[in-house]
Amino acid sequence: MADKLKIKEEELKAIQVAVSRVNQMKTLLGDITTQAHKAQLQVLQAEEALAEEQKVLEASYGSITVDLNTGEYEEVVEEVEEAKE
């Protein structure tokens, strides 16, 4: 049986390090992607909770704009556009 050909030891180590680094970065990217997905879901949940709070306020006060610093509010007056002839 013939001996198998081999690359130099330092070349083998260099390629092993490079492959290992690529695999580490792929794992890191997968982790970051998963975290981003979870964050997107949390944002959606927060937006839904905000919409529910807005509905509660609208049911109590009608259509209003609230100053988030003071709690003061103003009614929203919808301007009706005049029909252009």
Image (cartoon, rainbow, N blue to C red):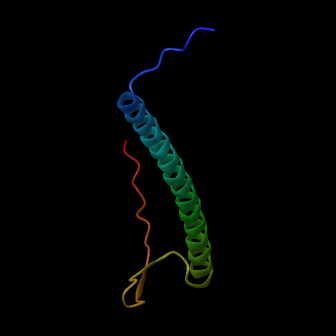
Tell me where residue 38 appears, x and y as whole percent. 57, 59
Q: Is residue 52 above or below residue 83?
A: below
Quadrant where the N terminus is found in the figure? top right
What residue appears at the point 42 percent right and 42 percent down from the top-left corner? 21
What residue appears at the point 37 percent right and 34 percent down from the top-left corner? 14
Question: Which residue sits furthest top?
Answer: 2
Q: Is residue 5 above or below residue 79?
A: above
Which is more toward the observer, 5 or 36?
A: 5
Which is more toward the observer, 29 or 41?
A: 29
Q: Quadrant of residue 62?
A: bottom right
Total labels: the figure holds: 0
Quadrant where the C terminus is found in the figure? top left
What residue appears at the point 47 percent right and 46 percent down from the top-left corner? 24
Which is more toward the observer, 64 or 47?
A: 47
Q: Is residue 52 above or below residue 6?
A: below
Which is more toward the observer, 79 or 71?
A: 71
Tell me where residue 54 appears, x and y as whole percent. 56, 75
Tell me where residue 20 appears, x and y as whole percent. 46, 40
What residue appears at the point 62 percent right and 73 percent down from the top-left corner? 52
